[in-house]
């Protein structure tokens, strides 16, 4: 029976190829003496130094404890356990739980599914499965499975919150000569607590993603892995007392302006203007609700001792508050037996305009009304600044595979947001900030 880690090699491209080909799922037993019940695990013991007091480093928007200034284990340290039961020749049950230091080591269920092999090429899984949104999403917490200390934060920070899907997927695997193809169609939903780090104390909103569906296709060649995925979310909603306050205020102001616009003795031009303003204010309600699209195209190539990895992503939140983003990452590495130095570039760039709050401009009718509109406008403008995820990074590091199933990594990251009023993908309590962050990481990855 294969498990998520398989037998590691010095070339992590092979390990990743196997993982992407479906090793996270329990495969059908090929040997009569394969154990029916198997326990395995993975972990990372990582310490990161952050030189910026203003910006805490986070793995996801759900993280309780950011890695603030100084040394911290909160960013990368994780322990995972996986239990697999081969109930029959074609039927398996898989459970996987993780505990992250940044979440106070509270256990979280990442996988809990039934896998049924339908034919030689087709299998179906139902229950809780790992997120397949990006190239490394399904192994993002298994540090040993990827080259660097962590997948690039400018890209993966935006999707790490969606760690699992509750639903089902259909997998088709087929070999064409020396090329293994995996196609995965999936459908499900996900929930998490989205944290507003700028509030004191930090508040969490209930974030819900419904009707997540998509397709991921990967091709594994002897020296190349290709993968593309596209995901659509039917609805993304965020609810908290703060969001409810915004919704209540927009409804109240829109109703008041609409009532004024309906007054029969108003000049026609003024009435039409007030009605348009009321409609504009209604459009600002539930500003975080959206129907996001995620797209990813990536590769992992080997040429002798050299390795090149790349990924291009697109996030279209279809929300004026959050916006549309284009991202990429490229990593170049060279192996010297057990030692592999690498350099990496990554960027997430907002490609849409900021939220337009001009509908909340003063009416000139009532000073009290205009003051309340100005207060709401200021709050939404501030929320829009905190919602800007634009971040870029340059990283350099070295990986040392000093023994089987274990790797030591040293990594330096220089991350930067577009300016002092752009928090990027950091836990920020106030603006302005110092927009440059330097991280130094020492981590030990293992599987067992």
Image (cartoon, rainbow, N blue to C red):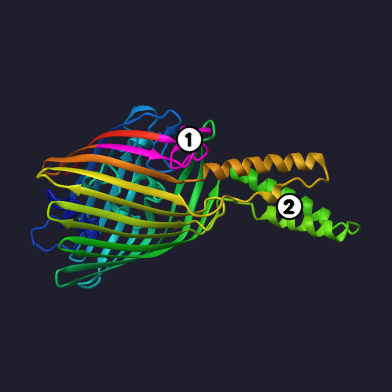
- First of labels 2, 1 by sequence position: 2
- Considering the numbered disc 1 on the image, is that residue within a helix, a strand or a loop? strand
Q: Is the magenta region chiefly helix, strand or loop?
A: loop
Q: Is residue 282 left or right of residue 186?
A: right
Using the image, determine if residue 280 lies above or below residue 230: above
User: Which mark, residue 428?
Assistant: 1
- Visible residue check, residue 151: no
Q: Quadrant of residue 339?
A: top left
The residue located at (68%, 47%) in the rendering is 248
- Residue 432 on the magenta segment: yes
Could you tell me how many numbered marks the image carries? 2
Most foreground residue, 398 or 256: 398
The residue located at (13%, 51%) in the rendering is 305
Q: Quadrant of residue 28?
A: bottom left
Using the image, determine if residue 83 lies above or below residue 429: below
User: Which mark, residue 254?
Assistant: 2
Most foreground residue, 340 or 133: 340
Q: Tell me where the magenta segment starts and ends, as one range.
A: 411-436
Mark 2 and mark 1 in contact? Answer it, CB < 8 Å: no
Q: Dot 2: within a 10 Å radius of its alpha carbon, few (fewer than 14), some, or many (20 or more) residues?
A: many
């Amino acid at each position: 029976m294969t498990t998520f880690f398989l037998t590691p090699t010095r070339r992590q491209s092979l390990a990743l190829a196997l993982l992407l080909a479906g090793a996270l799922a329990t495969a059908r037993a090929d040997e009569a003496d394969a154990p029916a019940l198997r326990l395995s695990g993975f972990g990372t013991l990582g310490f990161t130094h952050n030189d910026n007091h203003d910006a805490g480093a986070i793995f996801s928007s759900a993280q309780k404890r950011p890695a603030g200034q100084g040394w911290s284990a909160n960013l990368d340290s994780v322990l995972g356990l996986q239990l697999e039961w081969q109930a029959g020749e074609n039927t398996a049950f898989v459970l996987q739980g993780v505990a992250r230091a940044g979440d106070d080591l509270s256990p979280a269920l990442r996988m809990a599914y039934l896998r049924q092999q339908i034919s030689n090429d087709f299998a179906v899984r139902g229950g809780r499965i790992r997120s397949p949104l990006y190239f490394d999403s399904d192994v993002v917490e298994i540090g040993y499975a990827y080259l660097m200390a962590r997948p690039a934060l400018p890209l993966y920070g935006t999707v790490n919150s969606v760690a699992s899907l509750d639903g089902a997927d259909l997998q088709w695997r087929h070999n064409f000569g020396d090329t293994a193809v995996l196609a995965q169609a999936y459908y499900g939903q996900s929930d998490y607590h989205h944290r507003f780090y700028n509030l004191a104390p930090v508040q969490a909103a209930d974030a819900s993603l419904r009707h997540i569906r998509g397709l991921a296709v990967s091709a594994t060649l002897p020296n190349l892995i290709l993968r593309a995925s596209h995901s659509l979310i039917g609805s993304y909603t965020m609810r908290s007392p703060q969001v409810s306050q915004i919704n209540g205020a927009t409804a109240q102001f829109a109703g008041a302006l609409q009532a004024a616009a309906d007054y029969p003795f108003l000049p026609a031009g003024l009435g039409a203007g007030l009605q348009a303003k009321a409609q504009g204010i209604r459009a600002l309600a539930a500003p975080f609700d959206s129907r996001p699209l995620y797209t990813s195209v990536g590769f992992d190539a080997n040429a002798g001792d050299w390795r090149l990895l790349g990924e291009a992503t697109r996030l279209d939140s279809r929300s004026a508050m959050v916006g549309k983003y284009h991202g990429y990452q490229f990593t170049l590495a060279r192996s010297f037996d057990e030692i592999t130095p690498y350099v990496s570039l990554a960027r997430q760039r907002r490609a849409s305009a900021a939220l337009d709050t001009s509908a909340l401009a003063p009416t000139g009718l009532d000073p009290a009304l205009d003051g309340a509109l100005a207060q709401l406008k200021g709050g939404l403008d501030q929320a829009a600044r905190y919602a800007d995820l634009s971040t870029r990074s340059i990283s350099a590091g070295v990986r040392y595979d000093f023994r089987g199933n274990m790797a030591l990594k040293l990594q330096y990251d220089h991350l930067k947001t577009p300016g002092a009023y752009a928090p990027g993908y950091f836990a920020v309590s106030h603006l302005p900030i110092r927009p440059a962050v330097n991280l130094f990481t020492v981590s030990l990855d293992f599987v067992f």
